[in-house]
Image (cartoon, rainbow, N blue to C red):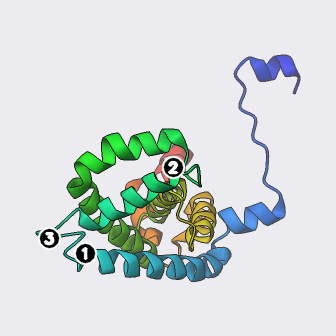
Amino acid sequence: MTIKEELQGKNIIIPDNPVSNFFFNNTRSGLLWLIIRLYLGYAWVSAGWHKVTDDKWVGSNAGAGLTGFVKGALGKAESGQDVSGWYATFLENMVLPNARVFSYVVAFGELLVGLGLILGLLTGIAAFFGAFMNASFLFAGTLSSNPLLFILATWIVLGWKVAGWYGLDRWALPFLGTPWNFRHRNKSVSL
């Protein structure tokens, strides 16, 4: 195929190397993903459950826990440590005035991400939102286990097609039409 043909709208499919193909397309890698999913899921469920059952995050005093976290991040930003100015502005102008709402979002978001990963349901989406929260915590200057959780969640996002094979995705994804839609394949064959 020439470059001219490529530029005229021809589809070019570049095959994966064998290692990538195994990790991101082969269901035999599902056991490795299961171990990573369970580890991440446990971390998220533990963090979320702690917040959901804490009055400072969910309940009559909701927002107090998040307010303390945000004020700590703003203090780091003022002293020029670990928090970028743009993120400090976001925390100060968006999160702090709406701490009660964000507190519920964080607490239940952590719990839902953990459950999605443990059950293997919409695994790629759960991992994406987990990585998003980890990135938010990292921007706020909190290291702890966030870098490791971010990296593992990013890998699960890349392996979304097989990461939930040993979980509910094995049935949910074909029902939703991706990536193993047998009904669609049968229709395209009969045409």
Q: Amino acid at mark 3?
A: Gly
Mark 1 or mark 3: name the one nearer the start of the chain: 1
Mark 1 or mark 2: name the one nearer the start of the chain: 1
Camera-nearest residue between 83 and 40:
83
Mark 2 or mark 3: name the one nearer the start of the chain: 3
Quadrant of the image containing the N terminus: top right
Q: Which mark is residue 59?
A: 3
**Which residue is label 2 attached to?**
77
The residue that appears at 34% across and 72% down in the rendered structure is: 111
Left or right of 149 on screen, residue 101: left
Tag nearer the camera, 1 or 2: 2
Tag nearer the camera, 1 or 3: 3
Residue 67 % position (x, y)? 30, 59
The residue that appears at 51% across and 71% down in the rendered structure is: 164
Distance between mark 1 and mark 3 Cα atoms: 8 Å
Residue 137 % position (x, y)? 48, 60
**Which residue is label 1 attached to?**
52
